[in-house]
Amino acid sequence: MKALLMAAGLGSRINEQIDGIPKCTVDIGNQALIENTIAELRRHRIEEIAMVVGYQANVITKLLRDESIRFYHNPFYDRTNSMVSLWFAREFLQGDDCLLLNADVYFESRVLEVVLQETACPVMYADPVRRYEGDYKFGYENGLLLRHGKELSLEETTGEYVGIAKVQESFLPIFLRRLQRLIQEKQYDLWWENVLYSFLGERNVYVTQIPPGLFWAEVDTWEDYRRILQFTNHLAHR
């Protein structure tokens, strides 16, 4: 198993409130969020880790200079979305099963255990508890993704997307061909997840739920960041 972390974006919704630093480098109590993520990956025996950087790339690479991380750079981070970031890291997507993660996602260790236990492919992860307040919503039935989007109604929503997906090695060539097609079509404003969404109607895209009670949060807003700090403070004092 290897892991690719997407960390090129600006994070405009919270950028000013965190003094312009990359979202994945926010302090979560005793370390940066991305340091915690890498520690969790290594704790679960994922040693081959890569990151796509762009906005303030030097801040991230300096922070992680003592880690064995492969870096890819999206020089067009301010004019493109994460689909292009994925394209710049395409050579990494071979040779083993691969986790794809948004680098601004904090998750407790048990979330990663759930992620790694799942054998379906390709699979994305969702939180069924956050149907009301979710940012990017999924509609799924019997473990199959049917709908996705920010504007899904409550009736259409089964859970909130967690920002993590897993692709088996055998599926990576198919995944890469679809990525190449989308890039050739100049779909530069799409998220990397749109590679998976593009298969809907052609093949199964699976969804595994994070069990209720497990904590995760993506640093999109100040409220998200506050929730992470509350959780890590609780961990430190229990």
Image: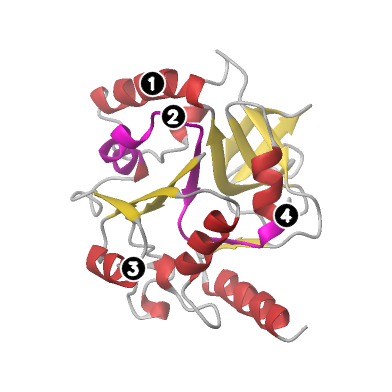
Q: Where is mark 3, residue-wise?
A: 66
Write down the region rendered in magenta: 83-110
Q: Mark 1 points at which residue?
A: 178
Nearest to viewer (mark 2 / mark 4): 2
Q: What residue type is labelled 4?
A: Arg
**Foreground disc of the pair 4, 3:** 3
| Closer mark to the observer between disc 1 and disc 4 | 1
Residue 191 in the image, given as x and y percentages of width and height: 41, 41
Q: Is residue 53 left or right of residue 225?
A: left
Give the Cα distance between marks 3 and 2.
Answer: 32 Å
Left or right relative to 59: residue 224? right
Alpha carbon distance from label 1 to label 3:
35 Å
Which residue is labeled 2 in the image? 195
Residue 228: quarter of image: bottom right
Q: Regarding mark 4 in the picture, which secondary structure is present there? A: loop
What residue is shown at x 61% (from left), y 62% (from top)? 217
Say whether residue 147 is magenta. no
